[in-house]
Amino acid sequence: MDYELRKPGTSAFARVADSTGNWVDTVAPQWARPYLRLSRFDRPIGSWLLLMPCWWSAALAAGMAHDIGRLPLTIVLFFIGAFVMRGAGCTWNDITDRDLDARVERTRSRPLPSGQVSVTQALAFLVAQALIGLVVLLQFNRFAVLTGIASLVIVAIYPFMKRITWWPQIVLGLAFSWGALMGFAVTFARIDVTALVLYAGAIAWVIGYDTIYAHQDAEDDALIGIKSTARLFGTHTHQALIMFYGLAVMLIGVALASGDAHWPAWLGLLAFALHLAWQIVRLRINDPALCLRLFKSNRDAGLLLFAGLLADAVMRAA
């Protein structure tokens, strides 16, 4: 076992199996640690991945509008919103999955299955995070507010998908890519074809990287009957990643062309594509530690694309 499990009331709370040595374990107050773990502040990669499509769309929309006046504030608000709402989503996921998590080695030390917090406490924490997210959302126009609220339907149903379909990663993609719509909703108070194509490209990206992530749990998932694209693709995962990552690059390229993007954005897309190709070459599905490292590297891939889009926005606004 690579985690320490102690009951509430002892000198330390349990460390989550795939997250040790982080600031939550070493710096955060003892009473706060289970809640920070519920919202995954000990593992912020998911928040970064939720944030990337938000930043892509904000930068692309600003470039199309030839106006970056509100872009810095939008970037900051999206950052806060992504981290808070990812925390709320993870809290909801842990509430619905607490019995399943107790049967998987990597997740049995999470706050709910290990007894560090009660369901009632987790629900209260969920509401608190959602309210902070609402405050952030209310800084935007009415159309953006309604667009953001609409995403909650997908977030609510996602935890149940792994029980009924081999493709829960599609539903995760619908949720985690929602930010690709939000930048346009904030900038133009509408969602056009460019936004929808960017959204589709982001969904393909999410399916790819979450398939890599799911290979960590493939054996346990098979034992307890949890479905995933990792189990579905199996030894054909590399071919599936070529398809989904290739589709992501193609669709994002179509969005750039539709948005009349200039060369910095295309350079960012090239760097993004090369990073995804590197992941496919490096991947070994029977190496959980490598799967986790490659999954986490998608933050860097997303930042490369964002850097190109940001430079493009600045160039077009000059």
Image (cartoon, rainbow, N blue to C red):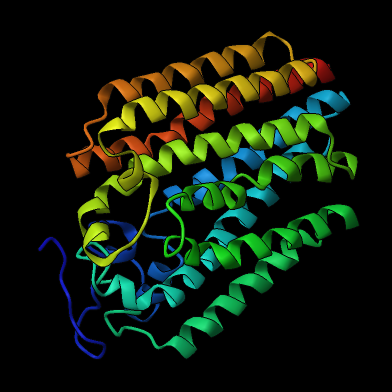
Q: How many numbered marks does the figure carry?
A: 0
Image location of residue 83, percent across then percent down: 55, 56
Image location of residue 267, percent across then percent down: 58, 12
Closer-to-camera residue (101/140): 101
Residue at 48 percent of width and 90 percent of height: 120
Residue 60: quadrant of the picture: top right
Q: Is residue 53 above or below residue 274?
A: below
Closer-to-camera residue (107/6): 107
Residue 306: quadrant of the picture: top right
Which quarter shows the N terminus? bottom left
Residue at 66 percent of width and 42 percent of height: 54
26 horizontally vs 69: left or right: left
Q: Is residue 223 above or below residue 92?
A: above
Which quarter shows the C terminus? top right
32 horizontally vs 309: left or right: left
Image location of residue 268, percent across then percent down: 57, 18
173 horizontally vs 264: left or right: left
Q: Residue furthest left?
A: 1
Q: Residue furthest top?
A: 263
Closer-to-camera residue (70/162): 162
Residue at 79 percent of width and 19 percent of height: 258
Closer-to-camera residue (63/95): 95
Q: Residue 260: in sight, yes or no?
A: yes
Q: Is residue 104 above or below residue 258?
A: below
Residue 66: quadrant of the picture: top right
Q: Is residue 156 above or below residue 69?
A: below
63 horizontally vs 5: left or right: right
Q: Residue 139: in sight, yes or no?
A: no
Residue at 55 percent of width and 52 percent of height: 171
